[in-house]
Amino acid sequence: MTVNPGSPEIRTLPVPDGLEGERVDAALSRMFGFSRTKAAELAAAGKVQLDGRAAGKSDRVVGGAWIEVEMPGVPRPVQLVAEPVPGMRIVHDDDHIVVIDKPIGVAAHPSPGWTGTTVVGGLAAAGYRISTSGAAERQGVVHRLDVGTSGLMVVAKSERAYTLLKQQFRDRTVDKRYHALVQGHPDPHTGTIDAPIDRHPTHDYKWAVVMGGKPSVTHYDTIEAFRAASLLSIKLETGRTHQIRVHMAALRHPCVGDLTYGADPTLSKRLGLERQWLHAVSLAFEHPGDGTWVRYESGYPADLTATLERVTDK
């Protein structure tokens, strides 16, 4: 799978009245979705103009002014590569949906910069025909799991299934359950995290609890507490990128092995874990074919089982 760089893109938008008085880097971050660090770099390179004049990162914007940004070359859409995915298990298959148990190291669909295997590529290699709805590179995909998170995903095979499943995810009626091994012992042992999530203000590849971010709600319950960690059952109301990882890190109880979000590397090494301990154990929804309520479940993969056995002695 290859990604070809595109030509620079000029984007021009009026500054919303709600951003009146904001710094240029903060306004760019809110308007275009990249980090303030990236916005500051673009301003320093002379690629930002306010009403036709060069703007610095600390200049203040005025509501209604036109802000123009010369964006870096945008990668052209990647091509889907039909490639077998070792370890990907088909849990259920019918005329409307296919439910898979995704191993780690596999993305849901192709994206710029990703050269590994994907769920949609694996299904194509296995001869599955899935919905053509959605963006070209993610047809049939109605929700995703992180590359480093294992467990259950449903992919739509028919256009009707795609529409109905997407609506259920939007209405938050899909029951998504995860198990996570987190550092320490959350107090209270059962609770709800209601904290907005958006891109990290300084790290493009991370997400964070950010004022003004997208509403994000996570429910957790302690299944078992060990000396150094706790096994949690987690139910998501919303489906933000890295939601569980971000919310648990915000509680100062990151998923064991999740070095990106502050997990203790020493503990991860002692337990022999090379990724975040997070698994999508259960997925339930109204079947788009006949409307019945269906539930699918997945056991822990070998690396998570081994870690769970070790943590009882640590």
Image (tube, rainbow, N blue to C red):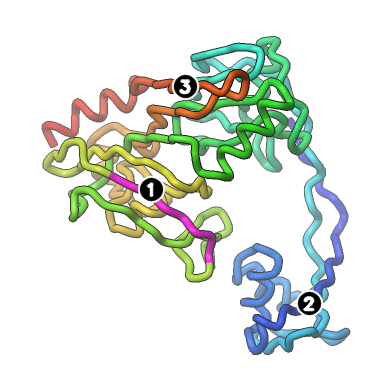
Q: Label 2: which residue?
A: 48
Which region is colored magenta? 213-220
CA distance for labels 3 and 1: 35 Å
The disc, 3 or 1, on the residue closer to the chain's N-terminal end is 1
Q: What amino acid is found at the position of numbered circle 3 in the picture?
A: Val
The disc, 2 or 3, on the residue closer to the chain's N-terminal end is 2
Residue 244 position in % (x across, y down): 40, 47
Quadrant in the rendering for residue 296? top left
Q: Which mark is residue 102?
A: none
Secondary structure, mark 2, is strand
Looking at the image, residue 95 sits to the left or right of residue 190; the answer is: right
Callout in the foreground (2, 3): 3
Q: Is residue 15 above or below residue 308?
A: below
Looking at the image, residue 255 sits to the left or right of residue 18; the answer is: left
Q: Which mark is residue 259?
A: 1
Residue 30 position in % (x across, y down): 64, 70
Q: What amino acid is found at the position of numbered circle 2 in the picture?
A: Val
Q: Which mark is residue 294?
A: 3
Q: Quadrant of the C terminus?
A: top left
Quadrant in the rendering for residue 267? top left
Secondary structure, mark 1, is helix
User: Is 293 in front, or is 58?
Assistant: 293
